[in-house]
Image (cartoon, rainbow, N blue to C red):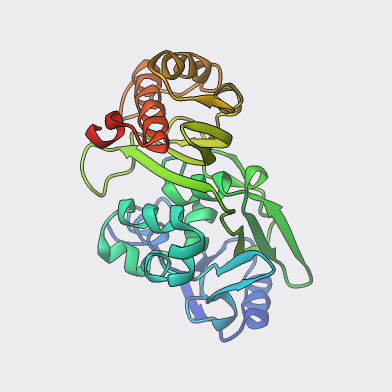
């Protein structure tokens, strides 16, 4: 199948992109890395009147640190995230997530902003942003605003972006002393979207987990913050009985839909397995090394 006919124009600046976008009307689409848009065009699931190429805009690139935050431009590719010393030092969760994303060819072209804007509920980076309490910086022709990641994803492939707004950057608080992060997922094959996954952040004191944040992906219509399970495990030491009770608490956080990967019951089971693995990993137990 071939893509439907469309006009194409390349923006030379952010101001130029907004001007083109407004002139082209509501049927226009932005083209960044294109790793989600191009396949939907090929299958005629998208039918834009105009594609506005923003892939070369320097205003949307770069990784920098200031005032306790790491700012990542929206056009930063997955590969650039994984290769950044700043990211590896201050945001190890992102560095760990990158090898789980699809395949090298996609990681070399796909962008952070594109992944968040597409908002696939089984994608790794949206869940990472929620777990890390990131702020999504969005721009329109006349204003800029910051949306907490927990409020940015509003449903299946849906976000809080208003018409003619784009993601300019994402700001992440740097990891605090004593904090650890982890991402684990279960997929049918390497490079596939996750059947279920979890991102986690917590302070660790011995084998006690403090101030945990648990965000699951692939088990809902958006990243799912497991607040009840997190509240249960806070301040407790990892024991077999404790892990089983935490898994029971997790059931109240999840209402997974059936999809091509399996039933809601299967999704719940996978999420419980992942929760046990991440708790053992944080505790540094033998179970974690064997998992």
Counting the numbered discs, the total is 0
User: Eyeballing the image, is 288 above or below 25?
Assistant: above
Give the camera-side residue of 177 and 58.
177
Residue 69, how many percent across, how many down? 63, 64
Residue occupying the point 48% across, 74% down: 7
Q: Quadrant of the N terminus?
A: bottom left
Expressed as whole percent of the image width and height from the top left, the position of residue 263 reads 35, 19
Q: Examine the rendering and report whether any part of residue 47 can be seen.
A: no
Q: Nearer the viewer, residue 23 or 140?
A: 140
Q: Is residue 92 above or below residue 276?
A: below
Please name the residue shown 48% across and 40% down the image: 200
Q: Which of the 4 image quadrants contains residue 25?
A: bottom right
Which residue occupies 37% across, 61% down?
35
- Give how far across and how far down residue 43 sits, in percent: 33, 52
Point out the residue furthest to the right here.
Answer: 142
Q: Depth check: 54 or 274 in front?
A: 274
261 over 42 or under it: above or below: above
Q: Residue at x 67, y 44 (%)?
A: 151
Residue 65 locus on image (x, y percent):
60, 72
């Amino acid at each position: 199948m071939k893509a439907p006919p469309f006009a194409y124009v390349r923006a030379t600046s952010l101001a130029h992109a907004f001007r083109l976008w407004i002139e082209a009307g509501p049927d226009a689409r932005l083209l960044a890395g294109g790793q989600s848009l191009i396949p939907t065009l090929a299958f005629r699931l998208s039918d834009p009147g105009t594609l506005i190429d923003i892939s070369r805009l320097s205003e949307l690139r770069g990784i920098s640190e200031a005032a306790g935050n790491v700012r990542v431009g929206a056009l930063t590719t997955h590969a650039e995230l994984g290769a950044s010393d700043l990211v590896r030092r201050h945001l190890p969760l992102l560095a760990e997530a990158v090898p789980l994303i699809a395949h090298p060819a996609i990681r070399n072209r796909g962008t952070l902003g594109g992944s968040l804007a597409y908002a696939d509920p089984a994608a790794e980076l949206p869940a990472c942003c929620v777990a890390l309490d990131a702020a999504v910086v969005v721009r329109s022709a006349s204003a800029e605003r910051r949306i907490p990641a927990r409020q940015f994803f509003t449903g299946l492939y849906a976000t809080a972006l208003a018409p003619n707004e784009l993601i300019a950057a994402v700001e992440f608080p740097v990891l605090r002393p004593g904090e650890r992060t982890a991402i684990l997922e279960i997929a049918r094959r390497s490079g596939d979207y996750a059947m279920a996954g979890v991102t986690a952040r917590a302070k660790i004191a011995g084998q006690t987990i403090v101030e945990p944040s648990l965000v699951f992906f692939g088990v809902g219509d958006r990243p799912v913050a497991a607040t009840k399970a997190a509240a249960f495990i806070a301040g407790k030491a990892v024991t077999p009985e404790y892990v089983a009770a935490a898994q029971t608490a997790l059931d109240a956080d999840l209402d997974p839909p059936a999809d091509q990967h399996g039933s809601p019951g299967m999704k719940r089971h996978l999420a419980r397995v992942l929760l046990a693995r991440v708790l053992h990993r944080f505790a540094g137990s033998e179970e974690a090394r064997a998992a």
